[in-house]
Image (cartoon, rainbow, N blue to C red):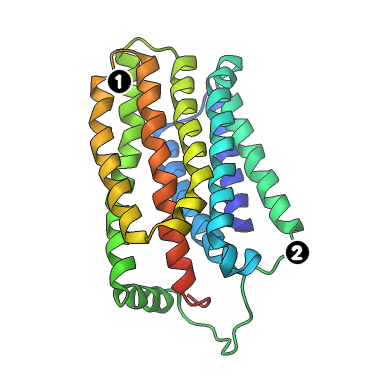
Amino acid sequence: MIWCEVGRTVLAGGVTVALWLNKLTMPQLYVTTVLAGILTTLFQVANTAALPNVVGRRQLSTALGYSQSAASAVGTLGASLAGALYTLGRTVPFAVNAVSFAVSAASLRLMRARFQLDRQDARTSRLTAEIREGLGWLWRQPVIRFLTLVSAADKVRYGAGYLLIITLAQQLGASSLWIGGIFSGAAVGALAGALVADRATRRFPLGRIAVVMLWLEALMFPLYALAPNPLLLAAVAAAESLVAPVYAVAMTTHQLAITPDEL
């Protein structure tokens, strides 16, 4: 996780310097986006895998709820500041992003928690072999396998949703500050969802949560196209974002509870 944060610091810092020198090119942005996506994925996987060893399996849903709440709170602040930072200078948001990754790397280095249990059969193996082992285990878990495929498809829709919101907001005449406010509304909704996720996970089975939450997302997504102004666009974003954390916490809690530590 530390090396992922160091890598993202370098990538964000490189964009900042290139933009400041008026040397930023589209190829650099493409490469930065791909590498940042890889590092982000690796960080998220490692972070999720370490959680049971840090808090214990009985507290997984609570810890995941708190984690989602913290991420949503940061998202609220970040979305609110994004437009304002850009008005201070086009390099400022990227510089702040680079600093945030550096702070994250330093804080991880200072943590004393054990992120992974000691393996009794400690061995070195190729990354491809470990990937095959993980995929083989996943394929033998029908519930997790199905929900993983659904989540993968939903991630594509979710990623396109950001561009859709920006495009619709611009068509409605929204300024950069308004667009930041719309994403703040989404972050507030995600924060509210994260606050109730633990209680919902403890009260309802995973199957019921998955069906209800995914149907709600599917029904709310078309409402973006019907929003007549930026304010209602923010309301739709907040409502849809409230649903996602509940489903995410329920699924991740179940997944971590049954996944062997070595995987």
Q: Nearer the viewer, residue 256 or 35?
A: 256
Residue picked out by circle 1: 168
Residue picked out by circle 2: 112
The correct choice, above or below, for 34 with respect to 164 in the image is below
Q: CA distance from mark 1 to mark 2?
A: 46 Å
Q: Label 1 sits on what residue type?
A: Leu
- Left or right: residue 99 versus residue 170 is right
Q: Secondary structure at mark 2?
A: loop
Residue 179 position, x and y percent, is: 43, 20
Q: Based on the displayed image, in which of its 4 quarters is residue 168 positioned? A: top left
Q: For the point 31% across and 56% down, which residue is it?
A: 208
Mark 1 neighbour density, 10 Å: few (under 14) some (14–19) many (20 or more): many
Q: For the point 28% across and 52% down, which residue is it?
A: 211
The correct choice, above or below, for 192 with respect to 234 in the image is below
Q: For the point 50% across and 37% down, which residue is it?
A: 192
Mark number, residue 84? none
Q: Label 2 sits on what residue type?
A: Arg
- Left or right: residue 134 versus residue 92 is left
**Residue found at the far bottom of this picture:** 121
Residue 256 position, x and y percent, is: 48, 67
Mark 2 neighbour density, 10 Å: few (under 14) some (14–19) many (20 or more): few
Residue 57 position, x and y percent, is: 57, 69
The correct choice, above or below, for 152 with respect to 171 in the image is below
Q: Nearer the viewer, residue 232 or 74?
A: 232
The correct choice, above or below, for 13 with respect to 122 in the image is above
Residue 85 in sight from this viewpoint: yes
Looking at marks 1 and 2 on the same chain, the residue that comes earlier in the sequence is marked by 2
**Residue found at the far front of this picture:** 203
Residue 18 in sight from this viewpoint: no
| Quadrant (top left/top right/bottom left/bottom right) for the N terminus | bottom right
